[in-house]
Amino acid sequence: MEKVKIYTTPNCPYCKMAKAYFQKNNVQYEEFDVSVDKKALEEMVSKSHQMGVPVIDINNEIIVGFNRSAIDAALHLK
């Protein structure tokens, strides 16, 4: 089973789209709100070298933004 982490902020529309996509495809994920979780923010920046969200970590494969084709490939959905 894939280990999925998503780094988000509350007002990020692409974060909401990614989470809805995971739910639609029955993908369990762990969410980290980097606006309040400093440790998660540091982890996200360390992994992605980015400050933008969402940052999605699927089995240590880092996807920046809501890139559906990259998510599908990492999850072997299509």
Image (tube, grey):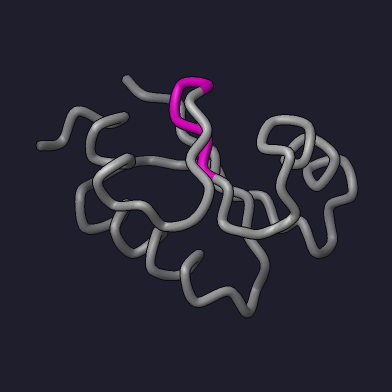
In this view of the protein, which residue sits in the foreground, 28 or 64? 64
Q: Quadrant of the C terminus?
A: top left
Decide whether residue 57 is among the magenta residues.
yes
What secondary structure do most residues of the magenta stretch adopt?
strand
- Determine the residue located farthest toward the left in the rendered image: 78
- Residue shown at the point (36%, 52%) measured from the top left: 67
- Residue shown at the point (46%, 34%) measured from the top left: 4
- Determine the residue located farthest toward the right in the rendered image: 38
In this picture, residue 22 sits left or right of residue 39: left
In this picture, residue 66 sits left or right of residue 74: right
- Residue shown at the point (52%, 33%) measured from the top left: 62
Q: Quadrant of the N terminus?
A: top left
Please determine whether, in this image, residue 31 is positioned above or below residue 2: below
In this view of the protein, which residue sits in the foreground, 20 or 61? 61
- Which quadrant of the structure image shows residue 34? bottom right
The image position of residue 38, as x and y in percent, is 89, 49
In this picture, residue 49 sits left or right of residue 78: right
Magenta-drawn segment:
56-60
Please determine whether, in this image, residue 60 is positioned above or below residue 13: above
- Residue shown at the point (41%, 59%) measured from the top left: 19
The image position of residue 44, as x and y in percent, is 72, 40
The image position of residue 45, as x and y in percent, is 77, 41
